[in-house]
C-alpha cells in the first residue's frame, strides 16, 4: 500500500483490470498524496503496473480480495480497467473464504454487462465497502468538452454525429454497447461484447473486403455512457490504442460524451490523433437530446 503524508486519511482501494487507465489513476492518486491499495486480477492487469504497490489475485477469490482491502484499511473502492473474462469457478473452489459467497456470485453471473456490474457492486457493498467512481478521486481523467482537430473536416460529419448519438442512446437502453461507427447515416458497426477495439478491427476488415468503398477517411466513432448507467463503474475509455485503431479503420474522427468518458495517456492520445489526422470532439447532450 502507498501511504500519504496525512496518516488519518483512509486509503482508496483500487480493484484493477487491464488497460492504461489503471496506471493513469494510480499516478493521479500518487500526485495528490492520496493513500491507496491495489488488488489486480491475474491475466487482466497490465504487466507495466508498478509491482511493488500491487497485490495480485485470481479471478473469483472474492473472499481474499475483501480481506486484503480490509487489512489495508480501505473503506472506499474504485473498480477500474478492462475485464476480458468472467470469473473462473475453479479459482473459487480453491479459495475457502469465497465458498460461502458462491450463491451470490452465481446469481451475479447471469444477465448482460449492466446487470453483472450492478450485482457485482451489490456484492462488494454487502462486504462493507462503498464503491465510488474513478472520476470522484481523479476528475482530471475525464474528457473535457471541446474539440481537437480540423473543424473543416468535422463539418462533413455533423449529421452523422446527431444520428449516431440517437442510435447509441437507443441501443444503450437495451444494454448493447457504448460505441458505434457511422458514415453518411449508415451504421457500419455496433460495439458488442468484444469491446471497442475489436469493433474497430471489424470496420478495418469491412474496408479490406470492399464492403466500405468510400475513398479517404470516412466515418466516425461515437462513444458514450449508456442512458441511466451507473457512473461508478464501466465508464467508456479512449486512449492511444483507440486512435490507432480508428486510423487503421480509415475513420475521420471520434466523438465522445464529455465528462463521461475517461482518457488514458491524454497527451499521447492527442499527439497521435494529430499525427493520424483524426479529429476528437468532446460533446454533451448524449442522454437527453
Image (cartoon, rainbow, N blue to C red):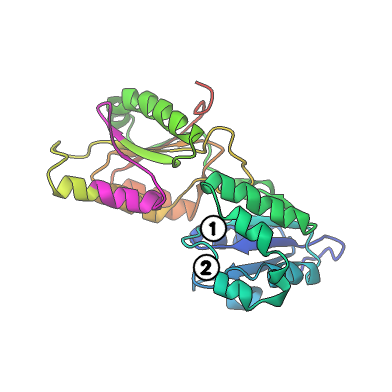
Mark 1 and mark 2 residues within 8 Å of each other at the beta carbon: yes
Q: Is residue 47 left or right of residue 194?
A: right
| Image vertical order of residue 245 relative to residue 183, above or below | below
Q: Is residue 49 left or right of residue 242?
A: right
Q: Which residue is mark 2?
A: 45
| Image vertical order of residue 258 relative to residue 249, above or below | above
Magenta range is 182-203
Image coordinates of residue 196 in percent, x first then y, are: 39, 49
Mark pair 1, 2: CA separation: 8 Å
Judge whether residue 37 is colored magenta: no
Q: Residue at x 87, y 62 (%)?
A: 8
Front residue of 37/278: it is 37
Front residue of 137/90: it is 90
Q: Residue at x 74, y 64 (%)?
A: 35
Does the image show residue 1?
Answer: no
Q: Residues within 10 Å of mark 2 (few under 14, many from 20)?
A: many
| Image vertical order of residue 280 relative to residue 41, above or below | above
Q: Which residue is mark 1?
A: 81
Amino acid at each position: 500500500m502507498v501511504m500519504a503524508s496525512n496518516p488519518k486519511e483512509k486509503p482508496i482501494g483500487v480493484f484493477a483490470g487491464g488497460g492504461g487507465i489503471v496506471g493513469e489513476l494510480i499516478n493521479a492518486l500518487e500526485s495528490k498524496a492520496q493513500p491507496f491499495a491495489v488488488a489486480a486480477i491475474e491475466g487482466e492487469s497490465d504487466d507495466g503496473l508498478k509491482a511493488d504497490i500491487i497485490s495480485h489475485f485470481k479471478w473469483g477469490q472474492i473472499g481474499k480480495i475483501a480481506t486484503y482491502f480490509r487489512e489495508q484499511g480501505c473503506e472506499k473502492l474504485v473498480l477500474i480497467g478492462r475485464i476480458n473474462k468472467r470469473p473462473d469457478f475453479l479459482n473459487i473452489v480453491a479459495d475457502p473464504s469465497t465458498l460461502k459467497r458462491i450463491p451470490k456470485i452465481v446469481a451475479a453471473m447471469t444477465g448482460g454487462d449492466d446487470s453483472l456490474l450492478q450485482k457485482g457492486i451489490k456484492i462488494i457493498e454487502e462486504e462493507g465497502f462503498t464503491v465510488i467512481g474513478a472520476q470522484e478521486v481523479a476528475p482530471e481523467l475525464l474528457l473535457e468538452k471541446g474539440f481537437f482537430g480540423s473543424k473543416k473536416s468535422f463539418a462533413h460529419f455533423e449529421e452523422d454525429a446527431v444520428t449516431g448519438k440517437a442510435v447509441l442512446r437507443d441501443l444503450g437502453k437495451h444494454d448493447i454497447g457504448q460505441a458505434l461507427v457511422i458514415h453518411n447515416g449508415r451504421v457500419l458497426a455496433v460495439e458488442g461484447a468484444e469491446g471497442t477495439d475489436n469493433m474497430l478491427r471489424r470496420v478495418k476488415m469491412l474496408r479490406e473486403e470492399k464492403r466500405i468503398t468510400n475513398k479517404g477517411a470516412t466515418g466516425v466513432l461515437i462513444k458514450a455512457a449508456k442512458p441511466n448507467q451507473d457512473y461508478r463503474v464501466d465508464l467508456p475509455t479512449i486512449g492511444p490504442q483507440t486512435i490507432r485503431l480508428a486510423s487503421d479503420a480509415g475513420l475521420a474522427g471520434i466523438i465522445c460524451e464529455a465528462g463521461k468518458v475517461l482518457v488514458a495517456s491524454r497527451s499521447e492520445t492527442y499527439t497521435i490523433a494529430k499525427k493520424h489526422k483524426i479529429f476528437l470532439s468532446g460533446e454533451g447532450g448524449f442522454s437527453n437530446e
